[in-house]
Image (cartoon, rainbow, N blue to C red):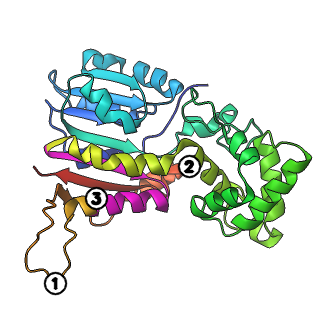
Amino acid sequence: MEFQHKSVLLDECMEALNIKPDGIYVDGTLGGGGHSYEICRRLSEKGRLIGIDQDEDAIEAAKARLGEFKDKVTVIRSNYCDMKRELNSRNIAAVDGILLDLGVSSYQLDNAERGFTYREDAPLDMRMDQRQQKTAKDIVNGYSEMELYRIIRDYGEEKFAKNIAKHIVNARKEKALETTGELIDVIKAAIPMKVRQVGGHPAKRTFQAIRIELNRELEVLSESLGDMIDLLNDGGRIAVITFHSLEDRIVKNIFREQEDPCICPKDFPVCVCGRKPKGRVITRKPIVPGEEELLSNRRAKSSKLRVFERIR
């Protein structure tokens, strides 16, 4: 199956990154290389792109897509949380721009074998990095009812989380849940019929929650965004595309903290905590897709772009 992923907010990202032809840029979620291709097109012979992804299929697809740019491009199989280490090992101390597109790729969703989709029956997998041993099946069958409730409530923002967790635990007493289809049947049984008939697929939120937990998506983002801002040169920018409110909140809050890190009480006449701003938030409100993009790419629907500029 060909790796395809329609790049979301493509023009907006290029404008946000304010690309310098001789600069060094990092795409921390390389995917099929759509955003990276457009970055490379704007680079001179001196410019450089570092592409990072943990998905082997994405790495192969991106290498093929970016092949024409030859030595300008370095592709690394890793998680963006290791960006600083990967760059340091290549003697890169600072960069001019970083892009993160946090969505699951269309390829991952459409390739049923990967177990991300709730539209086809497939093994319960959901690993973004297939070198990882733990799968969605381990979470569904191994987590306690309380743990399942917590992740479905917090990461899926699912109001029937308690009942879904209870149904999963009861179902797996009979036999282990092995496939997405089996899990979907259990979820459907836990949600009232009249609710199931509106508001999209009943398993959507639970699948999102399990995927986030398995791939540690929110921890990775929280733990590494500050480090990425530290990697930027003066005037360098980081652009982050999120696809749900939990990610967006993390990005918004960290950007805000980096712009105004002072923790002194408000009534202090001067700052004594010594925390200095690292830059400024470019996007007071997130950039969202226009009507034209939404018509041509339905998966862009919930995307939001936030941008931060480093000032040294």
Image x and y of residue 181, in percent:
80, 45
Task: Measure the alpha-carbon separation of dots 3 and 1.
Answer: 24 Å
Disc 1 designates what residue?
Answer: 267
Residue 258 in percent (x, y) is at: 23, 58
| Image quadrant where residue 28 sits | top left
Using a 10 Å C-alpha cutoff, classify the residue at mark 3 as few (fewer than 14 neighbours), some (14 to 19) or many (20 or more).
many
- Mark sitting on residue 255: 3
Residue drawn at point x = 16 percent, y = 56 percent: 279
Q: Which residue is mark 2?
A: 212
Q: Amino acid at mark 3?
A: Phe
Task: Check the picture and name the quadrant holding the N terminus.
Answer: top right
Q: Is residue 248 left or right of residue 70?
A: right
Task: Give the extent of the magenta segment.
Answer: 234-256
Mark 2 lies on a secondary structure that is helix
Q: Is residue 60 visible?
A: yes
Is 166 covered by the magenta stretch? no
Estimate how packed mark 1 is, as few (under 14), some (14 to 19) or many (20 or more) residues with alpha carbons within 10 Å.
few
Q: Amino acid at mark 2?
A: Ile
Tell me whether circle 2 and circle 1 mark residues in contact (CB < 8 Å).
no
Front position in the image: 63 or 250: 250
User: N-terminal of the two: label 3 or label 2?
Assistant: 2
The local crowd at label 2, few if under 14, some if 14 to 19, many if 20 or more residues have their Cα within 10 Å, is some
Relative image position of residue 247 (x, y in whole percent): 45, 56
